[in-house]
Image (spheres, rainbow, N blue to C red):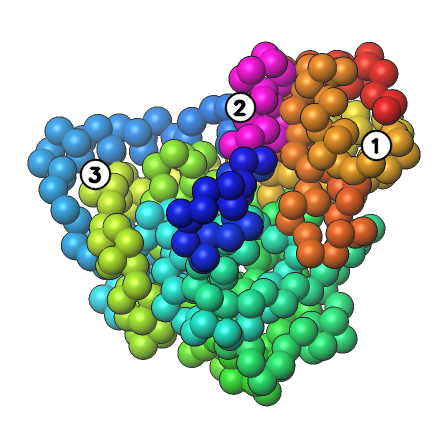
Amino acid sequence: MASIDQDHRAADRLRGISGTIFSEMSALAVRTGALNLGQGFPDRDGPESVVEAAVQALRGGRNQYAPGPGVPELRDAVVAHQTRQYGLDLDADRHVLVTTGATEAIAAALLALVNPGDEVVVLEPYYDSYTAMIQMAGGIRRPVTLRAPDFRLDADELRAAVSDRTSVLLLNSPHNPTGTVLDRTELEVVAEVAREHDLVVVTDEVYEHLVFDGGEHVPFATLPGMFERTVSISSSGKTFSFTGWKIGWVTGPEALVRTVQAAKQWLTFTSGAPLQPAIAHALANESAYYEALAKELEVKRDFLCDGLRRLDMDVYLPQSTYFVTTDVSRYGYADGLEFCLALPERAGVVAIPSQFFYDDVEEGRHKVRWAFCKEQEVLEEGVRRLLAADLRA
Ligand SMILES: Cc1ncc(COP(=O)(O)O)c(C=O)c1O
């Protein structure tokens, strides 16, 4: 990957931060004409009624700056969603902030809550914006590894990662890339630790609706006493298959939401004015869409996992998200990157080496992530190509 370190003019806060592996591998897919089972975007757009609502807003004079906290109808829709889904009682004026996707919410939360030198405890493998933003905020990451084959949260590892320098615990559940959905017992341990050390918990829940096998996503903020110390983040990208719209939101107690807004206002101030009412429409009217999407993804997960199991790799069945993780060590490559760089030529398929999402080099070395949020024909062709190829080093 092209590293910023090559440019001596780059500020220290960017040292070691490279281009995202997702862009890199997507470019490789385009260059080689390979099927892209790498980056997590669906092949098909979300509901037509939501597109129509955006067109109406575009034609209806919604094209100037939206209010900083977000348009009122979207904040109302987020509140109604949190009440309906999780029984949370929020106020649209005090407890909700609309953001430019979950990505900006994560950036703003970390810039707002982390002082230089503070430690941020984060689950690994991590979503790569976390490491970049912890560094840009001047923080130090303290990973807690979710280990194969089950990728569960180990209470002792969590306790060992927290110190008196920790200010934020950054959770991601449902978890990308492992597909782990933290259960109540695991979340209660997090709550205990947060209470003991007086931590703010930032939770990234963008896959909240894409849980399989009848499983349950428990928002951390619903645990007793936790709302007051939690910044909850979600987004419409995955829920409604509009990843390019970048409409996300933060919910939490007023003081924390205002603190995050203080940083957010100087990043974009506001964005997506005509898309915000369309997502309000989606949250209010299209719950059937994401319920059906979760069922469809579950079938696709099973299809891709069955195909991958016929290869010489360990396949870890995910409980949620768009992704399945595998271990490719038996193919004889030095690491997952080498495997993924050979894959387009060998099989005409692109996948993502997960090693970039780990500090624990050995745990991540041979892990490879595959996306199943693709059309069935694409998955079928991908599996057919992989089965026909010689993948050995
Ligand atoms: C865990 C996680 N958080 C955040 C995001 C980004 O969300 P958004 O597109 O709303 O910025 C993604 C996208 O892949 C993700 O997987």
Residue at screen point 46% across, 52% down? 14
Is the distance from the Cβ of mark 2 to the nearest ligand 1 atom less than 8 Å?
no
Alpha carbons under labels 3 and 2: distance apart: 30 Å
**Looking at the image, which residue sits at the far left?**
61
Q: Quarter-wise, where is residue 55 in the image?
A: top left
Q: Which residues are magenta?
A: 23-40
Mark 1 belongs to which amino acid?
A: Tyr
Q: Residues within 10 Å of mark 3 (few under 14, many from 20)?
A: many
For the C terminus, give its image quadrant: top right
Residue 177: x %, y % from top left: 64, 46
Q: Nearer the viewer, residue 203 or 284?
A: 203
Residue 86: x %, y % from top left: 47, 63
Residue 333: mark: 1
Against 266, residue 93 (above or below) is below
Q: Is residue 233 left or right of residue 155?
A: left
Q: Nearer the viewer, residue 90 or 34?
A: 34
Q: Nearer the viewer, mark 3 or mark 2?
A: 2
| Residue 202 makes an appearance in the image | no
Residue at screen point 58% across, 65% down? 141
Mark 2 belongs to which amino acid?
A: Ala
Pointer 2 residue: 27
Q: Earlier in the sequence, mark 3 or mark 2?
A: 2
Pointer 3 residue: 274
| Residue 154 makes an appearance in the image | yes
Q: Secondary structure at mark 3?
A: loop
Q: Secondary structure at mark 1?
A: loop
